[in-house]
Amino acid sequence: MNAQTERLTLTGPVGSIEALRDWAVTADGAPARGIAIVAHPHPLFGGTMDNKVVQTLARAFVQSGWTTVRFNFRGVGATEGVHDNGQGELQDLLAVIEQVAPEGPIALSGFSFGSFVTSHAVAQLATTRTIEQVVLVGTAASRFTVAPIPAELHERTLVVHGEADDTVALSSVMDWARPQILPVTVVPGGGHFFHGQLPLLKGLVMRHLRSAPAV
């Protein structure tokens, strides 16, 4: 993604995990705000860590002062294993977090299938880790059982969805968010992949990262 991108080979539950780490952009050599991990869309429908939305999320985090790691789920690219309908992918994500951010503040983000997996990582880690930011885009609520976001993280959570998403209906995301009273930011006319609107998506994420309350 930039000159600060580092290719990683991590250890997963069923073999190696292919990942990329982008170092934070900070002013005057200030330390990074923490480590952000971004999860990609559905592996069986072409989802990889090089997906344009995933790259956009990574850029938003990097330019907001977060060192960012994106990775391929099992069976994608050079990551070993086979697709496991989200259960094994959650273990992949947790393994990545354990290796690239064993301590300190973290941010968790995902797109589509990646949002579903990320939601379960948030639910599992919320009581043991400092999760400073959660960003879910195109949340696959019509296709998977997305975990609710703990109430204490709502102020630090951004959910973005396209009004015209024909892969995951906006109504399904609202049905997931409504019982939690969790706000959803809707991009007018936006599709699932935000074609032509990626700069807007990046801006929304950066605005959230800079304004969300600190832990």
Image (cartoon, rainbow, N blue to C red):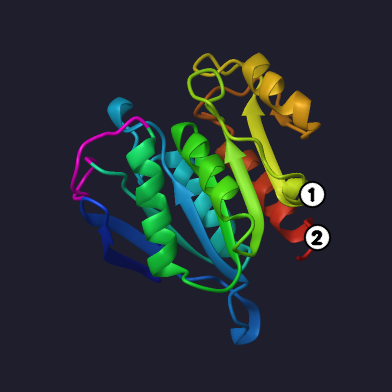
> In the figure, residue 107 lies in which quadrant?
bottom right
How crowded pointer 1 is (Cα within 10 Å; few <14, some 14-19, many 20+) is rated as: some
**Picture disc at residue 213:** 2
Residue at (26% x, 43% y) in the render: 74
Compared across the picture, whether 157 is left or right of 140 comes to: right
Task: Residue 128 in the image: state x and y as whole percent.
Answer: 60, 62
Which one is nearer the viewer's eye here, 186 or 154? 154
The local secondary structure at tag 2 comes to: loop
Labelled pair 1, 2 in contact (Cβ < 8 Å): yes
Q: What's the residue type where badge 2 is placed?
A: Pro
Residue at the spot 56% in from the left edge and 55% down from the top edge? 125
- Check disc 1 and report its element: helix, strand or loop: helix
Range of residues picked out in magenta = 75-85
Report the residue marked by disc 1: 155
Q: Could you say which is closer to the camera, residue 211 or residue 113? A: 113
In the rendered image, which quarter contains the N terminus? bottom left
Q: In this view, does 177 lie to the left or right of 37?
A: right
